[in-house]
Image (cartoon, rainbow, N blue to C red):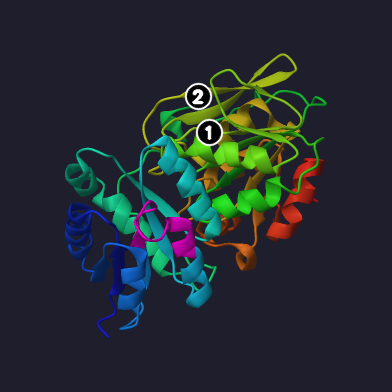
């Protein structure tokens, strides 16, 4: 054993397999243990030894990505990182693969795949390293982030004393990353139709958030949609920040709406949980509930602390029910979370709009 993470690549494109092999093998922490052009061939190769992480396409010959992931989870649960194309059909399939148990997603275009994957090497290796810490359905935090990072200051000034007075309109802000697609489905499908207005940041690539919102909308009693600039935040509705854009809460009189804006990456993410939480602290204050859920890194920890300082009710998902305890752990360390709760309890506090 050399201590490196063994990665197996499943993709019907020889070019993609070659480029992914080059990108992953360049990281000293990773070792490409094999490649296959389709899932059935991959299972044959797995007989020689299972990898630590599987990087897989979603649209493949002889077996689709959803069936592949379900079979992996049934035979020997292994973290799967989806490498999916930026198409509407690909996004819909990817949502089903994530629901089947995949833990992360990276994107690839139909054209210029080689250059794109080379330029996205950091995101790919980060996703594989995070997935590698999986213990069945639970992940541990990955290595500390190395890049220089922007804070929420790059998008919105810190809240002062101007958080508005209490109204009858409650706002719930949720932030999550790795493991969040399954966690959000678990929580949102348990909410009654009469629930507070919800704003959500789920770290996810551009174009995938629309498919994610559409899937949830078909499963939930509440309305779930990808946020558009100016959308009202209202009871019975959840707005999910679109991939590649920041989402901020604003208030006009007694009504809340969202702004969807461009800007730099914050904590290496766009949308960023810190940006959303800061805006909720600034414009909702004590009218809000903030919930930080499973995810890698620390995005949202400082924003949740700002919410608590502004009088909001705050909570974090507990370690036992997290896929990755990184984001909640950092929030707890900062004193940002007033309570720590298991996933099964979150729908109840969200429905009430307060974390107790």
Residue 232 sits above or below residue 8 on the image = above
Residue 260 sits above or below residue 214 on the image = above
The picture places residue 79, in percent across and down from the top left corner, at: 44, 66
Mark 1 lies on a secondary structure that is: loop
Decide which of 89, 126 is in the foreground and name it: 89
Disc on res. 349: none
Look at the numbered discs 2 and 1 and tell me whether their residues touch, using CB distance below 8 Å: yes
Q: Which residues are magenta?
A: 55-69
Q: Residue at x 27, y 66 (%)?
A: 36
Q: Earlier in the sequence, mark 2 or mark 1?
A: 1
Q: Magenta span has 62?
A: yes
**Quadrant location of residue 218?**
top right
Mark 2 lies on a secondary structure that is: strand
Disc on res. 260: 2
Decide which of 290, 104 is in the foreground and name it: 104
Relative to 340, 304 lies left or right: left
Question: How many C-alpha atoms fall within 10 Å of the one at disc 2: few (<14), some, or many (≥20)?
Answer: some
Q: Residue at x 18, y 46 (%)?
A: 114
Q: Residue at x 75, y 39 (%)?
A: 221
Decide which of 38, 199 is in the foreground and name it: 38
Residue at the spot of label 1? 241
Relative to 150, 27 lies left or right: left
Relative to 91, 187 lies left or right: right
The picture places residue 70, in percent across and down from the top left corner, at: 51, 65
Q: Residue at x 31, y 70 (%)?
A: 41
Residue 340 sits above or below residue 113 on the image = below
């Amino acid at each position: 054993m050399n201590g490196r993470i063994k990665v197996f690549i499943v993709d019907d494109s020889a070019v993609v397999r070659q480029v992914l092999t080059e990108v992953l093998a360049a990281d000293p922490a990773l070792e490409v243990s094999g490649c296959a052009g389709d899932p059935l061939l991959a299972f044959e190769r797995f007989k020689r030894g299972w990898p630590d992480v599987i990087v897989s396409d979603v649209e493949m010959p002889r077996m689709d990505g959803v069936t592949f992931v379900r079979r992996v989870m049934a035979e020997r649960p292994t973290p799967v990182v989806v490498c999916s194309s930026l198409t509407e059909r690909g996004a819909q399939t990817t949502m089903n693969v994530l629901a089947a148990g995949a833990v992360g997603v990276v994107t690839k275009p139909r054209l210029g795949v080689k250059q794109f994957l080379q330029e996205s090497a950091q995101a790919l290796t980060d996703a594989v390293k995070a997935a590698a810490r999986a213990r069945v359905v639970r992940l541990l935090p990955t290595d500390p982030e190395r890049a220089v990072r922007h804070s929420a200051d790059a998008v919105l000034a810190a809240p002062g004393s101007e958080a508005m007075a209490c109204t009858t309109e409650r706002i719930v802000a949720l932030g999550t990353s790795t493991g969040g697609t399954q966690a959000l489905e678990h929580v949102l499908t348990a909410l009654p139709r009469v629930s507070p207005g919800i704003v959500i940041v789920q770290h996810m690539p551009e174009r995938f958030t629309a498919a994610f919102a559409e899937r949830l909308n078909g499963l939930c009693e509440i309305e779930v949609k990808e946020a558009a600039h100016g959308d009202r935040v209202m009871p019975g509705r959840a707005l999910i920040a679109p991939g590649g854009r920041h989402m901020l809460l604003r208030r006009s009189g007694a009504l809340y709406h969202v702004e969807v804006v461009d800007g730099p990456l914050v904590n290496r993410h766009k949308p960023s949980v810190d940006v959303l939480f800061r805006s909720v602290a600034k414009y909702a204050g004590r009218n809000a509930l903030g919930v930080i859920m499973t995810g890698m890194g620390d995005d949202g920890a400082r924003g949740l602390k700002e919410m608590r300082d502004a009088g909001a009710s705050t909570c974090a998902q507990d370690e036992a029910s997290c896929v990755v305890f990184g984001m909640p752990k950092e929030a707890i360390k900062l004193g940002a979370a007033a309570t720590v709760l298991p996933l099964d309890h979150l729908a109840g506090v969200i429905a009430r709009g307060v974390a107790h």
